[in-house]
Image: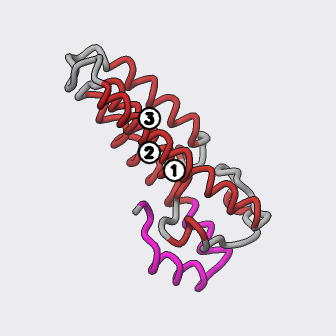
């Protein structure tokens, strides 16, 4: 299964999962389709996810390191401040929260499997290879960072 590592850009994985969630939304909804609570919950979750992801991109740009998830070996610095002091993968966390927002909006029990599938795929085929690259590049600094900051939350 290593051939799947760093193969697909995480936003493409997220869009694919979101599309699959939309397809599964034909299952009877958890909440009524017109529920304003459901709509606002989805909007709030989406705003939180976008804010987290953009904060991470901004931190990478300030550190002048790559945001290309397919080439982690080209990283020039270990970013551990800002949102990265709370989670090692805020961009993926932001995408996950966006998928949760989509699941809330779709109101389908099966759609809730999408964020789970995304988290599993990204962890196995994106985060773990990135962590190997970071360990190789930054050694003990990355080891200390990964011991003090959780992978997701």
Task: Please tell me whether residue 95 is drawn above or below residue 63 in the rendered image.
Answer: above
Secondary element under disc 2, as helix, strand or loop, is helix
**Rendering colour mode:** secondary structure
Residue at the (61%, 41%) spot, across then down: 9
Q: Which of the two discs, 1 and 3, labels the residue nearer the N terminus?
A: 3
Numbered disc 1: secondary structure: helix
The residue at 34%/24% (across/down) is: 106
Expressed as whole percent of the image width and height from the top left, the position of residue 49 reads 49, 46
Q: Secondary structure at mark 3?
A: helix
Q: Is 21 displayed left or right of 81 in the figure?
A: left
| Front in this rendered view, residue 43 or 30 | 43
What residue does disc 2 label?
A: 96
Q: Quadrant of residue 76?
A: bottom right
Q: Are marks 1 and 2 in contact (CB under 8 Å)?
A: yes
Task: Kindly report the distance in space between the C-alpha atoms of the residues bearing marks 1 and 2.
Answer: 6 Å
The image's mark for residue 92 is: 1
In what quadrant of the picture does the C terminus appear? bottom left
The label on residue 43 is 3
- Residue range in magenta is 130-152
**In the displayed structure image, the side of residue 100 where residue 91 appears, left or right:** right
72 vs 131, left or right, is right
N-term-proximal mark, 2 vs 3 = 3
Mark 3: give few (<14), some (14-19) or many (20+) Cα within 10 Å.
some
- Residue placed furthest toward the right: 64
- Pick the residue in front: 41 or 98: 41
Q: In terms of image quadrants, where is residue 71?
A: bottom right
Residue 149, image x, y percentages: 46, 74
Q: Residue 42, percent across and down?
A: 39, 34
Q: CA distance from mark 1 to mark 3?
A: 18 Å
Which quadrant would residue 110 be assigned to in this image?
top left
């Amino acid at each position: 299964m290593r051939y799947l590592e760093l193969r697909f850009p995480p936003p493409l994985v997220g869009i694919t999962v979101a599309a699959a969630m939309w397809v599964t939304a034909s299952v009877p909804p958890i909440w009524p389709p017109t529920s304003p609570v459901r709509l606002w919950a989805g909007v709030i979750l989406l705003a939180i996810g976008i804010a987290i992801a953009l904060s991470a991109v901004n931190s990478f740009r300030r550190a002048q390191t790559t945001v290309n998830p397919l080439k982690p070996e080209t990283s020039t610095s270990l970013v551990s401040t800002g949102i990265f002091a709370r989670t090692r993968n805020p961009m993926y966390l932001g995408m996950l929260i966006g998928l949760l927002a989509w699941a809330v909006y779709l109101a389908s029990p099966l759609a809730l499997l999408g964020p789970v599938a995304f988290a599993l795929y990204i962890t196995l085929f994106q985060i773990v290879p990135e962590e190997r690259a970071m360990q190789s590049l930054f050694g003990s600094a990355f080891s200390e960072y990964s011991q003090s900051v959780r992978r997701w939350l």
